[in-house]
Amino acid sequence: MKVIFDPKNYLGEIIDNQYQRTKKYIYPYYFIPILAVHTGCRLEELCMMKTEDIVKVGKVWVYKIKETGDYGDEETKVKTESSERDIPLHSILIDTIGFLDYVKFIREKGHERVFHELPFNSRRKNFQKNVGRFFNERYLVKLGLKSSDRKLSFHSFRHSVETHLTEMNVNPRYINHLQGHAQKDIGGEVYMKGIPPEQLLTNCVSKINWEIDFSKLKIKWK
């Protein structure tokens, strides 16, 4: 994790890179991995994010992941019904990285989607292709973290978040809710009782601590 988010590696490959394709998608490439390690979200859940999905529920800012997202002909759906949930935003995202300010900036520019640069793939019915390809086939390979012997990918972030929270002795119900996994009672029946965002933030999301100084990754985007 520390190698991936080392400022020299991360900013050097994304922000300072002169490769034209990277420059085109600079903000999705920059924000989405940082969001992933502080939310446990799937790649597509982040790529399809709308500005209207970032809202305040009570005292907590959340990313409201909806069961369906309507983009005209570009319709996306989350993986399952259990995937529909409110994800509290970690203080690193708000106070250190300035993600709320970025969303406000994009909204004021008139864009519906936070990462509007990402094209919709009509064949796969998603927005994630460019980010996945950059991260999995280029960035991880360049860092020596992906090879025939090492199978790391963007999806590894979800496993890392789950493992990290488990090691922090976070209640599995909170972890499952955060990641959009179906909950089961003793009899095996699925139940979808919601967890208030403030409770999820206090008992789960705020526990995420990668011991990385993300302030060194702060960038100017306007």
Image (cartoon, helix red, strand yellow):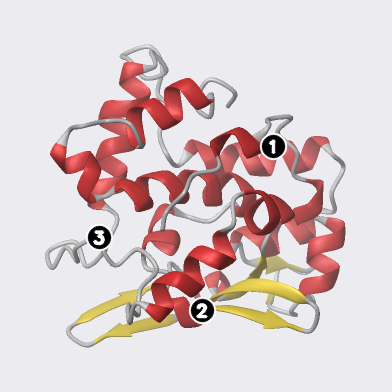
| Circle 1 residue | 163
Quadrant of the snapshot with the C terminus: bottom left
For marks 1 and 3 on the same chain, the one whose residue lies earlier in the sequence: 3
Residue 78: x %, y % from top left: 43, 71
Does residue 186 appear in the picture of this structure?
A: no
Residue at x 32%, y 18% (from the top left corner)? 142
- The quarter holding residue 139 reads top left
Q: Is residue 144 left or right of residue 34?
A: left
* Circle 2: element type: helix
Q: CA distance from mark 3 to mark 2?
A: 17 Å
Which one is closest to the eye, mark 1 or mark 3?
Answer: 3
Which one is closest to the eye, mark 2 or mark 1?
Answer: 2
| Circle 3 residue | 118
Q: CA distance from mark 1 to mark 3?
A: 30 Å
- Disc 3 residue type? Leu
- Disc 2 residue type? Asp
| Circle 2 residue | 53
* Circle 1: element type: helix
Does residue 215 appear in the picture of this structure?
A: yes
Q: Is residue 138 left or right of residue 203?
A: left
Classed neighbour count for the residue bearing mark 3: other residues with Cα under 10 Å, few (<14), some (14–19), many (≥20):
many
- Disc 1 residue type? Thr
Q: Are the residues flagged by discs 3 and 2 in contact, CB closer than 8 Å?
A: no
Q: In terms of depth relative to the viewer, which is nearer, 12 or 171?
A: 12
The label on residue 122 is none
Work out whether 64 lies above or below 188. Answer: below
Residue 168: x %, y % from top left: 84, 39
Residue at x 68%, y 30% (from the top left corner)? 212
For marks 2 and 1 on the same chain, the one whose residue lies earlier in the sequence: 2
